[in-house]
Image: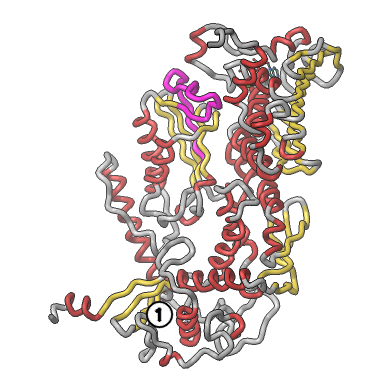
Amino acid sequence: MAQIKILPIHLVNKIAAGECIERPSSVVKELIENAIDAGAGKIDVTIEQGGSKLIRVVDDAAGIEPDELPVAVAPHATSKLLDENDLYTISTMGFRGEALASIAAVSMTRISSVRPEARAGGSIEVIDGQCSAVRPYAGAGGTIVEVQNLFYNTPARRKFLKTPATEFGHIQEQIIRTALACPRIAFHLQHNGRTVLELPTAETLRDRIGDVFGPELAGPLMQVFVQDGTLGLEAYVCRPEDAKPSARWQYLFVNRRPVRDRYISHALREAYRGLIAADRQPIAFVYLDMDPTLVDVNVHPTKSEVRFVDPGQIHSLVLGSIRDRFLSTDFPARLMPDAVPEPASPSGHGRDAAGLKQSVTNALADFLRNTGSAQPNFKFDAPRSAPKPTSGAGQRFPNDPAVVTGPRQATEPEPVEQAQTDMGPSLSSPALQIHNTYLVVETSEGFMIIDQHALHERVLYQQLCDRLKAGSLPRQRLLVPQVVHLTGQQMAQLDAIKSKLNDVGIEVELFGPRSIGVHSLPALVDQVDAGEFIEDLLGRLEEQIEPEAEQTVEHILQSLACKAAVKAGDPLKPEEIRTLLDYREQIDLTSSCPHGRPTALRMTLAELQKRFKRT
Ligand code: ADP
Ligand code: MG
């Protein structure tokens, strides 16, 4: 047996670093939290190669005395906790006193700092756990922390770093999370020499949300504001019709600290229950302020999780206040057709639930009324770009045999009467479109109801996949490029997948710092609105974070198919219906659209007879 020994301090630090410094974004998090705690008005972050080469954070805050610099990088050294009681009433972002020590243990770190009232400051370097002597440093008031070659001395961890684009994605997300809660602090983020995020000081939380995600997103958000004793809630939440395909736009803060919390997330979902489709998520920025003794932030080294003394109280505050806000709001009655209202839950919000149910019922009635009024052919007759000759069927279903995959590829579609398969449509009688959304079709065994959007999406997706696999996804150059405006964050996100887009025939060019031009699209879907497509695609990719992953191409094709497909509410001409049903037989039929929603519901004659008690 080996002798028991106390570990040398540089090893202790390396082990501790493993806990709070997981990847470059963890370094950025710790450094900007330090700048905030020191009272920064502006924080500048410079990143090179996803942070593995350089992370530099510059602030204009209180600075560190030269002779305190070596102490700042010592483990468990902090100016933020004086005694044990402070631990239970933490009001600063940091308090563990281990971030700088941990960072310095796994990188080459230089800290240069000047107290604003002093004329000169100091600078130290820490390499391999060895702190240099303090050298004089003259610069503007504030602190510069430079972290080079992160994990150079922990090869196992360095190996786990993802590509620079992925690591930078995490860094950017980290800064956004923090910045959303500190509107008074200006942030600037640059990667490999390019500015990605430029957030000026903002007056209000809403202004900051707008600077990050664009005024189109921030403007329509509804403000929720409640003060219940020491417990305060300020939230910005979307109207139900603006809900997004992922939970990416949900940000939760407790005492201005970004957190994840399943109670708050659950309360949000409950608040929108019945008002949005099952596959949608609300946009929500939720800021809770509470007595620090009622929440424990010291649960996890990265402090991203908290523990509430009374989680039930937080849950009902969030749920109740958002519902109250809905009840006092007149929504333009519009509802996803598949947002079926759930039965009211007996959860102490009986009055609210009943009111909500009523508004959902009204909205549903309005939806059905509105979509009933036909707007003939507006989609099909107004091609957005490079008009093509129409051939009987509409633009969306070009009657081009090359487009059709499968055994009948080379021939004109056969007369539909003969195109009868076991359960497929038999169009001896024409298909009936109801509510401009569903197609009712007689089959040999009974009938079926097809969701026109889901089916078209499925068909397009299959065709895109097949053609890509066969190596021929022809691109259509647009006569006039479609211009799309994006946030800096979206720009970076898009930049990371540019080559994947090009692989499927989508050429994108930077137009300005916040806009791009789309020059070509796959010919099969060249009518798609590039703005809608990119917004949808980036939404799908948000949860993935790794732009080079295999699924990116899948997401691109799904998003294209979704946005190019006819929508619920689009009236279809009889020949368009026929073409669509015809395609249905030619694709490899599984019964789901790319999201896994069913495309068709079937009913047999036997079932009908049973229902009508004919047996
Ligand atoms: P903690 O933030 O938990 O106190 P850190 O290791 O992150 O621990 O920082 C140690 C100490 O260094 C802080 O308590 C603070 O006094 C000082 N410090 C770190 N960064 C800055 C900064 N940007 N400006 C001023 N002081 C700083
Ligand atoms: Mg800190």
The residue under the point 36% across, 39% down is 320
User: Mark 1 vs ligand 2: CB under 8 Å?
Assistant: no
Quarter holding ligand 2: top right
Which amino acid lies under the numbered mark 1 shown in the image of this protein? Gln
State whether residue 555 is above or below residue 305. below
Identify residue for label 1.
433
Residue 521 placement: quadrant: bottom right
- Residue 79 in sight: no
The residue under the point 64% across, 13% down is 75
Q: Is label 1 in a helix, a strand or a loop?
A: strand
**Where does the image place residue 554, in percent across and percent down from the top left?**
57, 60
Give yes or no for residue 290 being in the magenta stretch.
Answer: yes
Position of the C terminus by quadrant:
bottom left
- Residue 367 in sight: yes
State whether residue 394 is above or below residue 68. below
Write the start and end of the magenta stretch as one range.
285-306
**Where does the image place residue 417, in percent across and percent down from the top left?**
41, 92
The residue under the point 81% across, 11% down is 134
Residue 608 placement: quadrant: bottom left
